Image (cartoon, rainbow, N blue to C red):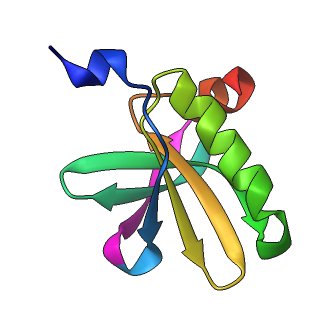
Amino acid sequence: MNLRRTMPMIPLFLSHQLVHPFKFWYDNQLQEGIRFGKELYCFVADFAAADRQKAFSLAVSLAEQGTPVYITCMGAKYKVWVNLGICPHEATTAA
């Protein structure tokens, strides 16, 4: 039995120290991205520490749609990232 098909994906929380940031050009503007392992992720949204529940809600909503999602925390900000195969515009409008 393939558990990936039967179990919903959950957003994973990563220390910002474990990811490698980069910038890339998409949709006529500079975008923020991270690399974790062999995978690339693009920035979706950030939230103040006081609004961390909103970050987790967005991440869960995206994960329920089958989108690989990570959350990073640096200082007082939580950032939500999706697999680079998902366009940033599509990710934010899908949630």
The percent coordinates of residue 68 (x first, y second) are 42, 36
Q: Is residue 34 left or right of residue 43?
A: left
Within the image, what quadrant is residue 57 found in? top right
Above or below 88: residue 55: below
From the viewer's side, name the closer residue of 92 and 13.
Answer: 13
Residue 49 is inside the magenta segment: no
**Image point (41%, 38%), residue name:** 83
Q: Is residue 25 left or right of residue 49?
A: left
Number of marks drawn = 0
**Image point (30%, 15%), residue name:** 5
Within the image, what quadrant is residue 85 found in? top left
Above or below 75: residue 57: above
Q: Is residue 47 left or right of residue 12?
A: right
The percent coordinates of residue 80 (x first, y second) are 59, 52
**Image point (45%, 75%), residue name:** 16
**Image point (59%, 35%), residue name:** 88
From the viewer's side, name the closer residue of 18 and 29.
Answer: 18
The percent coordinates of residue 52 (x first, y second) are 75, 63
Q: Is residue 49 left or right of residue 13?
A: right
Main secondary structure of the magenta stretch: strand
The answer to whether residue 30 is visible is: yes
- Name the residue furthest front: 1
- Name the residue furthest left: 1
The percent coordinates of residue 60 (x first, y second) are 61, 38
Q: Where, quadrant-wise, is the N terminus in this rendering?
A: top left
Q: Where, quadrant-wise, is the C terminus in this rendering?
A: top right
Magenta segment range? 18-28
The answer to whether residue 28 is visible is: no
From the viewer's side, name the closer residue of 72 and 84.
Answer: 72
